[in-house]
Image (cartoon, rainbow, N blue to C red):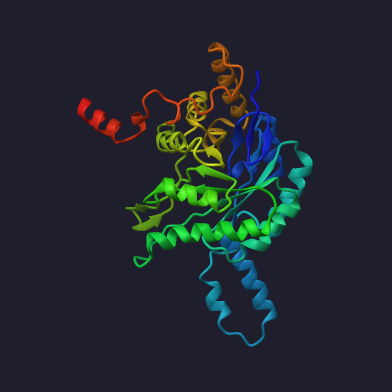
Amino acid sequence: MDLRTRYLGLELKHPLIASAGPLSRTLDGIRRLEDGNAAAIVLFSLFEEQIRQEQAVVEQLTAEGTESFPEALSYFPALAEYAVGSDAYLNLIRSAAEAVSVPIIGSLNGVTNAGWIDYARAIEEAGAAALELNVFHIPTDLETTGAEVEQRYLDVLAAVKLAVRIPVAIKLNPYFSAFGSMAKRLALAGADGLVLFNRFYQPDIALDSLTVAPTLELSRANEIRLPLLWLALLHGRLDVSLAATSGVEHASEVIKYLLAGADVVMTTSALLRAGPQHMADLLRGLVRWLAERGHPSVAAIRGTMSQAHVANPAAFERANYIRILQSV
């Protein structure tokens, strides 16, 4: 059975990828992900705040008579809040590229194009096969317009694409007013792939201490429906790779994402729950399903349940929304 797929121009042995997360923070973790049968590994993210603080420290050490830096540095999260600095991140890429046979995909997380260009180039030079941009931006300024938010994504993409030759994917949230149009603009701007969707981690309120508390909940299978919808709508209509992420627990979610049109399926939550070896379980479930239905390859099912191929395309549109509500 032919499980091969292409993502960002990379030939992969199958469509299951370990997405950015804590399992890829160390070389040992990366080896475990490869042993678990990940076809590619997205490293945990290097944050823009790390880059900006390191630059500020350098400028502070080299500037004379500057009084503003101690105050300015307080605007940035302490470097200790992050796992590693940028040099260690680049060293990990170098070590991983030599230690494992699967592609290593770097990840940059931020909101502006400042400071990204040099690090994107450094990630490429360190041996990353591709780069994922995670533009995690919550526009809390009430004066910021939707057009300005969209332009921020396009500016970051344009800056990085000019800096590197390796493929670049951009990880998106679903909250654009016209997501299809935004996806098309990013494709036309040079994105090699789109990753659907980023999960925003909203804070909670701790009632005992009356403090704002960070929260982290691993994704669940019921979260696949929104990315499933947009994968089905975008498949065959944009000249980019499509990656599905969020909600992968079992092989059934992998199969649904492929049927909708995903080129690859990414997961971290399932691997954190069950261990890196769960990737092999997901793959076995996919192979079993394909064999039971006589499908010779992953390519044979990709996109067969996308809007362009289903018997009733309206199932993805407003008509289905009305039908569901009327049936309750």
- Tell me if I can see residue 277 in this picture: yes
Query: Which image quadrant for residue 299?
Result: top right
- Tell me if I can see residue 174 in this picture: no
Query: Which image quadrant for residue 70?
Result: bottom right
Q: Residue at x 62, y 65 (%)?
A: 115
Depth check, front residue: 225 or 238: 238
Query: Which image quadrant for residue 21?
Result: top right
Q: Which residue is drawn at 75% across and 44% down?
A: 97
The furthest residue to the bottom: 65
Depth check, front residue: 264 or 203: 264
- Residue 174 in picture, x, y percent from top left: 42, 46
Q: Residue at x 56, y 64 (%)?
A: 78
- Residue 259 in picture, x, y percent from top left: 49, 26
Q: In which quarter of the image is the N terminus?
A: top right
310 over 128 or under it: above or below: above
Left or right, 97 with reference to 158: right
- Residue 186 in picture, x, y percent from top left: 52, 51
Q: Which residue is drawn at 38% across and 65% down?
A: 144
Left or right, 259 with reference to 147: right
The furthest residue to the right: 98
Q: Quadrant of the C terminus?
A: top left
- Residue 82 in picture, x, y percent from top left: 59, 56
Number of marks in picture: 0
Left or right, 267 with reference to 100: left
